[in-house]
Image (cartoon, rainbow, N blue to C red):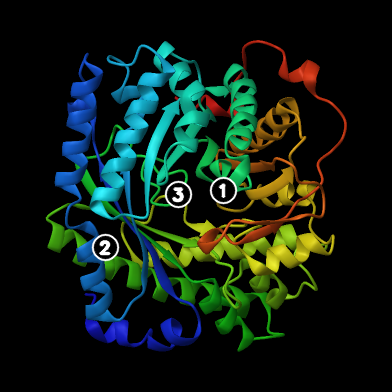
């Protein structure tokens, strides 16, 4: 039974340790908005979103005030738009029209982000999928709140290398079209392997086709809480370390469970999942990298970093699963460079490289996240980095992702300011050698042998 007493126990976490509910995300199915006429499709999409989420922001603010829990973002995720627009959209411009409709609906409801400008192409690409993918640069350049994600591979199907090559081109083009804003469009664009249907975090949130008509998913974050707890057991054994992380994750997840249940009841929308992800912010003391240092590393990226991150991620999941029957989404530890001051410091001093980050993604929640690279990085190189990350996800049966930002006009060592939760980042070097011949091959990489489990 979750009660107010449990929430009162978290007062110090909220006031001193940066505990927050990062997002309440309402998932909305748009399958009933499919129409052969583009204008009718847009009208249906706008009406469905604005009617479903009209009270979302107000409800989040009410819950925050009632329990004293900061709720940073209120967000919407929708059915992948490649499906929604498949009948009406005959060109990329038609998909951009839907993107602008989504943006208009986001502004009307007052949410911070709207995710689901997405396509699921892990095995093959339909005409609608390709049109949506080619529309992404213009869609993200001409909207403010729309986020886009593409699932390029899975453990069951392999990796769609044609789509990987195309996404390298689209990421670079998105960077060019938003060059006046330090290529900010790429911060709203992520590619996945094994994307979950119920992720409440942006830019990767979309409303999976197996979900109900509407659903409430909550994402909780508490890197500062975990670090503070570990300070009290400094120098203790691994057993004590693990137990401390688990107990802390349990308490944080209970807060998310309470908020999710309250939002579900107030909005009359079913509760979906709690995503316990240690999602950092640029605020001092709210850093996953600082947790790794508290575990015993001089800097994130030092030898032992991957092992420490594996320990952290596993114990967070174990504690969260005990706190809620419905833990889902990504749940674990995020390692975005720009959104984590400790990661920024490690990258700036050379302790953390792109190659080390790739190794860390084998054991963390997502992947190469919010990493600024030189603006002259070629589309083929971007595709190669994506392919490597997709392979890690495919072979290890886990979710992996890439959110690279080739910042036009910037070079290694330059500083890029994104603002807000997105923070700032140093431009990191990439391997200078070409993978053009590899990326130019047609087809897909087959699923691994251990995917055949029927």
Give the distance between the C-alpha atoms of the residues marked 2 and 1, in whole angstroms: 23 Å
Quarter of the image with the C terminus is: top left
Question: Would residue 83 be found to the left or right of residue 196 on screen?
Answer: left
Mark 1 Cα-neighbour bin, 10 Å: few <14, some 14–19, many ≥20: many
- On screen, residue 63 above or below 46: below
Tag of residue 202: 3
Closer to the camera in the image, 304 or 357: 357
As helix, strand or loop, the secondary structure at mark 3 comes to loop
Task: State if disc 2 and disc 3 touch (CB < 8 Å).
Answer: no
Q: Nearer the viewer, mark 1 or mark 3?
A: 3
Residue 72 in picture, x, y percent from top left: 39, 66
Give the distance between the C-alpha atoms of the residues marked 3 and 2, in whole angstroms: 18 Å
Closer to the camera in the image, 452 or 18: 18
Residue at the front extreme, as displayed: 180
Q: Residue at x 72, y 19 (%)?
A: 439
As helix, strand or loop, the secondary structure at mark 1 comes to loop
Question: Would residue 84 be found to the left or right of residue 283 on screen?
Answer: left
Q: Which residue is mark 2?
A: 260
As helix, strand or loop, the secondary structure at mark 2 comes to helix
Q: Which residue is mark 1?
A: 366
- Of pointers 3 and 2, the one earlier in the residue sequence: 3
């Amino acid at each position: 039974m979750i009660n107010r007493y449990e929430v009162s126990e978290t007062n110090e976490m909220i006031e001193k340790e940066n505990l927050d509910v990062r997002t309440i995300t309402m998932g909305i199915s748009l399958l009933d908005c499919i129409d052969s006429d583009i204008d009718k499709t847009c009208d249906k999409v706008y009406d469905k979103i604005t009617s479903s989420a009209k009270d979302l922001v107000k409800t989040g603010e009410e819950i925050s005030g009632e329990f004293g829990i900061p709720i940073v973002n209120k967000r919407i995720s929708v059915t992948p738009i490649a499906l929604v627009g498949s009948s009406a959209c005959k060109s990329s411009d038609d998909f951009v029209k839907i993107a602008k409709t989504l943006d208009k609906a986001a502004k009307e409801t007052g949410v911070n982000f709207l995710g689901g400008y997405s396509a699921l192409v892990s095995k093959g690409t339909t005409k609608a999928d390709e049109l949506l993918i080619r529309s992404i640069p213009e869609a993200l350049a001409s909207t403010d709140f729309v986020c886009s994600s593409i699932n390029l591979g899975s453990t069951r199907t392999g990796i769609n290398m044609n789509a990987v090559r195309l996404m390298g081109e689209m990421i670079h083009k998105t960077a060019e079209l938003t060059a006046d804003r330090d290529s900010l469009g790429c911060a709203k664009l992520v590619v996945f392997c094994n994307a979950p249907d119920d992720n409440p975090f942006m830019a990767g949130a979309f409303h999976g086709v197996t979900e109900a008509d509407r659903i409430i998913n909550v994402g909780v974050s508490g890197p500062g809480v975990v670090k503070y707890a570990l300070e009290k057991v400094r120098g203790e054994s691994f057993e004590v370390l693990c137990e401390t992380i688990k107990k802390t994750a349990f308490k944080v997840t209970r807060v998310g469970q309470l908020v999710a249940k309250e939002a579900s009841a107030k909005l009359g929308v079913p509760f979906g999942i709690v995503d316990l992800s240690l999602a950092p912010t640029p605020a001092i003391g709210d850093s996953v990298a600082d947790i790794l240092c508290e575990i015993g590393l001089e800097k994130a990226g030092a030898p032992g970093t991957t092992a420490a991150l594996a320990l952290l991620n596993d114990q967070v999941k174990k504690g969260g699963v005990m706190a809620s029957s419905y833990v889902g989404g990504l749940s674990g530890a995020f390692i975005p460079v720009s959104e984590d001051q400790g990661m920024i410091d490690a990258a700036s001093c050379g302790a953390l490289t792109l190659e080390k980050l790739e190794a860390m993604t084998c054991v963390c929640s997502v992947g190469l996240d919010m990493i600024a690279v030189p603006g002259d990085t070629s589309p083929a190189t971007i595709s190669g980095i994506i392919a490597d990350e997709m392979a890690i996800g495919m072979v290890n049966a886990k979710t992996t992702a890439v959110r690279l930002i080739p910042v036009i006009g910037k070079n290694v060592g330059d500083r890029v300011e994104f603002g807000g939760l997105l923070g700032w980042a140093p431009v990191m070097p990439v391997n200078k050698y070409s993978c053009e011949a590899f990326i130019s091959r047609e087809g897909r990489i087959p699923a691994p042998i251990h995917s055949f489990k029927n």
